[in-house]
Image (cartoon, coloured by chain):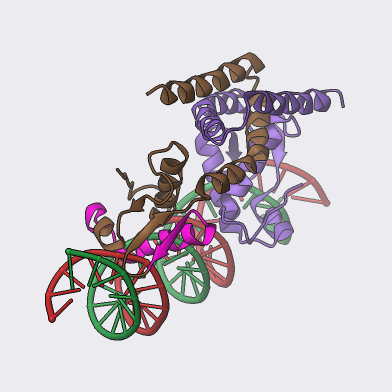
Chain colours: A brown, B purple, C green, D red
Amino acid sequence: MFSIDIMSRQPVYEQLIAQIEHFVLIGILKSNDKIPSVRSLAVDLSINPNTIQKAYSELDRRGIIYSVPGRGCFVSEEANNILSQFKREKLSELEDLVFELALANISKEELIDCINNAYKKKEGMEND
Amino acid sequence: MFSIDIMSRQPVYEQLIAQIEHFVLIGILKSNDKIPSVRSLAVDLSINPNTIQKAYSELDRRGIIYSVPGRGCFVSEEANNILSQFKREKLSELEDLVFELALANISKEELIDCINNAYKKKEGMEND
DNA sequence: CCATGTGTACTATATCGAATAGTACACACA
DNA sequence: TGTGTGTACTATTCGATATAGTACACATGG
């Protein structure tokens, strides 16, 4: 389920956070689903339990998951709403990126094709 | 001319690279323009000369600048072409970002507005 | 010629974040 | 009661970043 790249410049715990959030967004993880335990995931990924714990703590802090001592960690009810709001704040990031591409003489049509592709990808996914 | 954020997670030398490349793209720096010397820029920014040198080495490696021992560093003839090609390779990055935003139920129209804004920003700049 | 400014190379050191290692405690459940 | 769970510590290792200092070769202008 998870794929971690040890060689990446992005820290392992951030990769974990991003992947879990992605799984929530695409619906693989739903509200109240249990996510793997700290220790089992550490064994699966050959990663130190503390690193998993660090990712889970941050996801808890963001309200994406909640943890029940002795039972495990679960996806929260509000996870999707929180993530949607989170992503919306990235619109300015998109505008910066597009501006850079525009400066590099990439045509507006090319970028709009790019957007259409992304939306087709989403719709294709929903039909599964 | 340069603004460095010491507190940023992005390393100083990468900030320098990004800013010089940006200045080339928007036309503030043109072919064969001299860029500040390692030592003077180090004084201006209160940064260690080695850090500037690291950025310049990388820009040289990328073909954005060329250096003449004893004289200084200059923007290369091919800088703009290289950067344009470089940015084009970021189209996949754009598609990934748009896909994430699409999953967060941000409408296609909103994203197209975003693109239009970026292009307006570019055109507005060219009229100066 | 010579002082100054330039790029370049090198070693050493300090600092910080990420990751590992190990231990410990409280809780839930079968 | 044993096992699995989250959580909280401390100590340590490791790598990238940045600093500090020195040195050399070159170009330019007085």
Is the stretch drawn in magenta largely helix, strand or loop?
helix
Does residue B112 show up?
A: yes
Q: Residue at x 46, y 23 (%)?
A: A121
Does residue A9 show up?
A: no
Magenta span includes A61:
yes
Q: Residue at x 63, y 33 (%)?
A: A97
Q: Position of residue A39 (x, y in %)?
A: 26, 63
In this image, B20 relative to B10: left or right? right
Picture layout, residue A96 above or below residue D10: above
Q: Position of residue B51 (x, y in %)?
A: 57, 56
Magenta-highlighted residues: A43-68
Q: Residue at x 44, y 43 (%)?
A: A24
The total number of labels drawn is: 0
Quadrant including the C terminus of chain B: top right
Q: Position of residue B100 (x, y in %)?
A: 52, 35
Magenta span includes A6:
no
